[in-house]
Image (cartoon, rainbow, N blue to C red):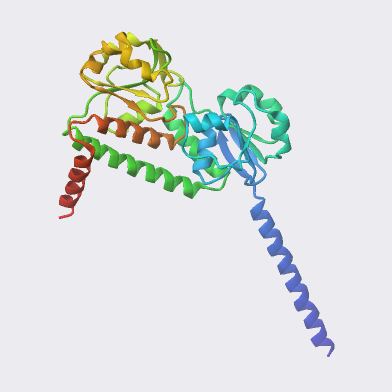
Amino acid sequence: MLVTQLNAILARSVLLVTMVLVSWGSLAEVQAPVQIQDSRGLQTLAQVPNRVAVLNWDVAEQVLELGITPIAMPDIDGYREWVMKPQVPESVSDIGTRVEPNFQRLAALKPDVIIIASPQLDLLPKLEQIAPVLFFQTYSEHHDNAKAAIDNFKQIAKVLGREEVAAQRLAKMNANIEQMKEKLAVAYSGHLPKVTSFRFASMTSIYQYGDNSTSQYALSLLGIEPAIAQGRSQWGARQKRLKELRHVGEGIALYFRPFAQEPQLDSSVMWQAMPFVRAKKMNSVESAWNYGGAISIEYMAQALTDSLLEIAPVKPRVTQALVSNKKGESNL
């Protein structure tokens, strides 16, 4: 009888110890530290964060593309006008501007981590009083901006426990861009035009995109060379006089929307005198953010492709049929 009781007590003790160890193991797994490389070097967070605040549009885009809804971000109305994709859920709190966020409102939201970009770097000491801060610099003249955007996307995914999601999304982006490239090759009969893209600063000046811009990077993925060569800069853009676009030559000029004075272009003598305007080798591009994260490259490529297909020698519906036939023949 005594032996039986002792065995029962021992069994309960073993079960209790096992349950405690399992509980500790689960807790350790949930609270395991996360180590990642941000633009300052190796950073360690106590665990995967749940409440994420983002203080720049490019990092906001990166987080949203990973399927994470941030608790806060700046200037949501501006994001919806200029960036647009991916959409910002209504539950996200607006915390002011990108350069002057509302610190009191941000602190009240109790973030687990705050993710910033170069425009917020000088705010770092103050932000660190609220929560751990990660800094990701995408745009710099000292590195390849497109590569930095993709590398940062992977690191942010690691922080948020979404590495597999990031890999799948990047693979989808590359596949989609390959399809766009095929459509353009057919639409231009294998002879893709050279293209220069820009935004209007005013009726007489522009921001021309060149090396280190997501616009030119997207065009290169589509197999297209620049009509006007332009060296590297931090943001991939340089302000120039509108008349400099005359060097587009036989190429195509594409300008990004929105441009508030767009209706006035029809009556602009300078614009109408441009060779590419007279030759109808120009078009507008629907809004796409030129200073975004990794997946903005796909949105940029899609907007540029749609614009080029509108003025292509072979029209879009015919192009789609030719691409489909080409794929069918390759499967024979």
Q: Residue at x 76, y 70 (%)?
A: 16
Q: Residue at x 56, y 48 (%)?
A: 161
Residue 327's spot in the image, x, y percent?
20, 49
Task: State the residue in front, 16 or 217.
Answer: 217
Q: Residue at x 18, y 35 (%)?
A: 314
Q: Is residue 247 above or below residue 110?
A: above
Residue 79's spot in the image, x, y percent?
52, 31
Labels in figure, total: 0
Within the image, what quadrant is residue 36 found in?
top right
Q: Could you tell whether 160 is left or right of 145 in the image?
A: right
Q: Residue at x 56, y 45 (%)?
A: 68
Instruction: Name the image quarter holding the N terminus.
Output: bottom right
Instruction: Name the image quarter holding the C terminus.
Output: bottom left
Q: Could you tell whether 278 is left or right of 121 in the image?
A: left
Residue 155's spot in the image, x, y percent?
52, 39
Q: Is residue 288 above or below residue 277?
A: below
Q: Is residue 136 visible to us here?
A: no
Q: Residue furthest right?
A: 2
Within the image, what quadrant is residue 158 found in?
top right
Residue 137's spot in the image, x, y percent?
53, 28
Q: Is residue 128 visible to us here?
A: yes
Q: Residue furthest bottom?
A: 1
Q: Could you tell whether 228 is left or right of 21 in the image?
A: left
